[in-house]
Image (spheres, grey):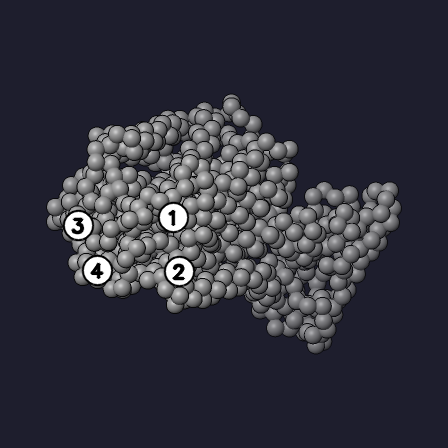
Amino acid sequence: MSGPDKKTETHRLVAKLLVVVLAMFGFGYALVPLYEIICEVTGLNGKTGQVSLAGVTGPDTSRVITVRFTATVNSAAPWDFQPNDRVMEVHPGGLYETSYQAKNRTGHLLVGQAAPSVVPREASLYFNKTECFCFTRQEFGPDEVRDMPVQFVIDRNIPAHIETLVLSYTFFDITEKG
Amino acid sequence: MSTAAPAEHDHHEEHATGLTRWLTTTNHKDIGTLYLWFSFIMFFVGGFMALIIRAELFQPGLQIVDPQFFNSMTTMHALIMIFGAVMPAFVGLANWMIPMMLGAPDMALPRMNNWSFWILPFAFAMLLGTLFMDGGAPAAGWTMYAPLVLQTGDAFPFMIFSIHLMGISSVMGAINIVATILNMRAPGMTLLRMPLFVWTWLITAYLLIAVMPVLAGAVTMLLTDKFFGTSFFNAAGGGDPVMFQHIFWFFGHPEVYILILPAFGIMSQIIPTFARKPLFGYASMVYASASIAFLSFIVWAHHMFTVGMPLAGQLFFMFATMLIAVPTGVKVFNWVATMWRGAMTFETPMLFAISFVILFTIGGFSGLMLAITPADFQYHDSYFVVAHFHYVLVPGAIFAIIAGVYYWLPKWTGRMYSEPLGKLHFWTSMIFMNITFFPMHFVGLAGMPRRIPDYAVQFADFNMIASIGAFGFGFSQLIFLYIVLRAIRTGEPATAQVWEGAHGLEWTLPSPAPYHTFDTPPDPQLIVKEGHS
């Protein structure tokens, strides 16, 4: 039963199983990019498209879409943060610009970072930004006030039943993380 | 069946003595015993925490513990019961029984076996040590959802590392079990002649190998998010807290089948013995277990319907979840069909087995209710969920373990337990268990949230009943401890076959099973004759 053959066989099997263990550990990490891709493809979480000029095809004046802007500060961080336009009426395919204003309420340097989101999530697939202050470090000196521009275009292919969408920015304090 | 097929064991009781024996042992029976005692101790530790929870919930208002400590108790109770009581108990039973059932002399990797057990006391010493740290023990729930769990105090890295250790231990145990089953079977013991306990453990071991590393990855991400500036689950850095839930439940759902498949195996050994009929539908049992294992990988998001997902996702996870009822139904049908027109007797293991079939099925039905996405929005995070998973884990996993202990104890110790005391233990456990958990369905449906130390006064009566049941159930387990100790010391000597209807290689060995068994493989004829029953 426990001849040398049996032993090598067992060791070979254990080696194979250990490969599976390592592969599954890697798979756990692979779920991270996989999740990003799934969210992007399906528009889950309201993740907006890439920063690109794709979709700027000239305005389709036959349609008007209402875009509302909202702003949130995470965890009561010491910022004032609001959109400079609350509402815009736009045509799909046209390029538009607006901005958000942030103010450092403290007397020292703060670093912030914003994460965007679009609802309804179905619309997020058609909402492209050509310029955005999201996901980049924003340094604010003591009491500094600054406007941060957003350029966007709504794809002409956006389904007809979407008449209003909301672009929301959440501002995070990442001073400690640097 | 009392004729021992294997040759004489001339090196019979040749092993170190005292503490060294237990520290250095590579014998599958010793290691099985260590696992079982460890899990028994953890069962009482986790049970004590449950009683703190139920004492606080005896009346509305805050009486006994502060809310932070209450949350620590729910978190630690779950971690200890899952990773410290139920999983090690199954591994202990596997260690004891699988080599004997297969006609193998020992586990395939005896030294790794020693190591995989001895990691556990360290893991749990570390986890329990967090109770005395600044900021208290982990209190964010056993599911460790980010970002809440990142607020844990000094306990945080200790919790993560103890989970890593538990994971390493179970993966090593699982590899050992797969290697034993695939490579150590006696000649003539084909895969489809294996007892079902062995089959369900083979499938469980594969589940462990597949998902414990994913849990290890998830908690490592938490660790680096907290201490090394990564942003896996931090929205400020472009991460997503909901992603933690997806990764966690990708591990978590197969985990719940890890907690129940070996129980299915134990049932499939016990019921034929006391029904004195072969198991009905052996092959369908094997396929049903494998289907359950497969489906467990594609239903994880039913734990998180309320975080928001597309309609297609909700429908997929709802129907995939409901699909699991089919193979599970096959199993329940087969157990009932095995009992049908059998010459049944109702010794303690059988009583626990029959109550398993009924009460586990109740837990399965409440699971189906939770699977219905629109209804889940009401049930989510309520006591209904608590009732559901306790019905599948207490009269499911734990009753199966208890039944297995009564069933095999005479083989391990060579002595019978006291049948009247066993019956007393069964009836108190079964009645108090229902008094504890059944009212939770009602308060849950009426809207009582879980993991909260206080509740609205309209839930007071049912909570008081549940708390009384919990204390009754807890103290009933002391009867169990007494029965086991008494059997070891003064029980009546057991015969080799122990139970009139028992079939399988393990029952051809003398009781107690000698320290070394099947050094020479059993006669293939014997394997055919003892067949799977």
The local crowd at label 2, few if under 14, some if 14 to 19, many if 20 or more residues have their Cα within 10 Å, is many
Question: Residue B347 versus residue B296: which sits nearer the camera?
Answer: B347
The quadrant holding residue B103 is bottom left
At mark 3, the secondary structure is loop
Question: Looking at the picture, how far across and down is residue B255, in whole percent?
Answer: 44, 51
Q: Name the residue under label 3.
A: B3
Give the numbered dot on residue B27: 1
Mark 3 → mark 1, Cα distance in angstroms: 24 Å
Q: How crowded is mark 4: few (under 14 residues within 10 Å), some or many (20 or more)?
A: some
Q: In which quarter of the view is residue B393 placed?
A: top left
| Residue indicated by mark 4 | B523
Type of the residue with mark 4: Asp
Say which chain tag 2 marks: B
Name the residue at 62% across, 33% down.
Answer: B133
Query: How far apart are the two marked residues, 4 and 3, measured between alpha carbons?
Result: 12 Å
Measure how far apart labels 4 and 1 are at the Cα level. Answer: 23 Å
- Marking on residue B210: none
Check contact, mark 2 vs mark 3: CB within 8 A.
no
Q: Find out whether the residues at labels 2 and 4 contact each other: C-beta distance under 8 Å.
A: no
Q: Residue at x 85, y 47 (%)?
A: A109
Is mark 3 in CB contact (under 8 Å) with mark 1?
A: no
Image label count: 4
How dense is the environment of label 1, judged by Cα within 10 Å: few (below 14), some, or many (20 and up)?
A: many
Q: Earlier in the sequence, mark 4 or mark 1?
A: 1
Residue A47 sits in quarter: bottom right
Q: Please identify, in this view, whether the residue under mark 1 or under mark 2 is nearer the observer.
A: 1
Residue B467 position within the rendered picture, expressed as x and y whole percent measured from the top left: 40, 28
| Label 1, label 2: how far apart the Cα atoms are | 16 Å
